[in-house]
Image (cartoon, grey):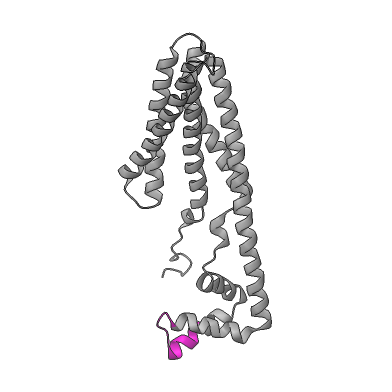
Amino acid sequence: MISSKSSIHVEPHIRESNYIRDLVFGFGDGVNTSLGIIAGVGGAIIAADIVILAALIGMFTGAKAMAVQNYLAVKSQRQILESEIKREKFEIENTPEKERQEIELIYKSKGFEGADLKSVVDKITSNKEVWLKTMLTEELGLNLEILGNPLKGALVMFGSFLLGGILPILPYFVVKFGLMSSSTAIIIAILISITSSFIVGAIKARIAQMSIIKGGIEMAALGTGIALVGYGIGAELARLGIVTVQ
């Protein structure tokens, strides 16, 4: 005989989906941010040291900004949800009949009636923890667990941004030691961005249950577009003599 506990289907990945989102968006933003800086500064044919310095500053600044924004956003959402939880707890304790009627209406709309409806309502309202969770999910559509931890989300965003951001910078470390030209480094950085952006876009599309190919191409095209705009701006500034070239 199979116990009821062993027959429960658990999907823990749903609770971790927010961290996957942070990882994907942080990595993608890091790649595109660094590439935009490298293409813009490198387009002016400025020394490799300056390109690396500018990209690293942009990378760490962007990572910090994204992490802080993610932390504040998740924390604010959790505070809103926690206030709703407190309100529902108060109503269950002080106006139980009204809350019971709301449970009845919810399950009546799902097709329950008569003895079945009463049985479901009695079962739910016999346990205040179950009652509260039911009100939050069925009435308000809230789930505190899905939001995740603000600090953990911020750290994931920070780390993934740095991981993505360092990739387009790597070719310029080779340039610094005289093993590659700046123009070759830009091309390699763009190729790295296109490849990694395609992978990130495909993962995002997979999470959203969309076309992996379409999602990858869309993300890669946006990354390449940033590089071309940045390169054009840098090259034009150099042509006008606003910045000093090598």
Q: Residue at x 49, y 18 (%)?
A: 240
Q: Residue at x 40, y 37 (%)?
A: 222
Against 239, residue 218 (above or below) is: below
Against 190, residue 130 (above or below) is: below
Can residue 155 be seen here? The reply is: no
User: Which residue sits furthest bottom?
Assistant: 114
Label count reads 0
- Residue 178: x and y in percent read 48, 8
**Nearer to me, 133 or 80:** 80
Instruction: Specify start and end residues of the magenta stretch as a single range.
Output: 109-120
- Residue 73: x and y in percent read 60, 52
Q: Residue at x 41, y 36 (%)?
A: 197
- Residue 152: x and y in percent read 60, 46
Q: Is residue 237 magenta?
A: no
Can residue 103 be seen here? The reply is: yes
Against 42, residue 22 (above or below) is: below
Image quadrant where one finds the N terminus: bottom left
Q: Residue at x 43, y 88 (%)?
A: 113
User: Which residue sits furthest front?
Assistant: 240
- Residue 211: x and y in percent read 31, 48
Against 133, residue 97 (above or below) is: below
Quarter residue 11 falls in: bottom left
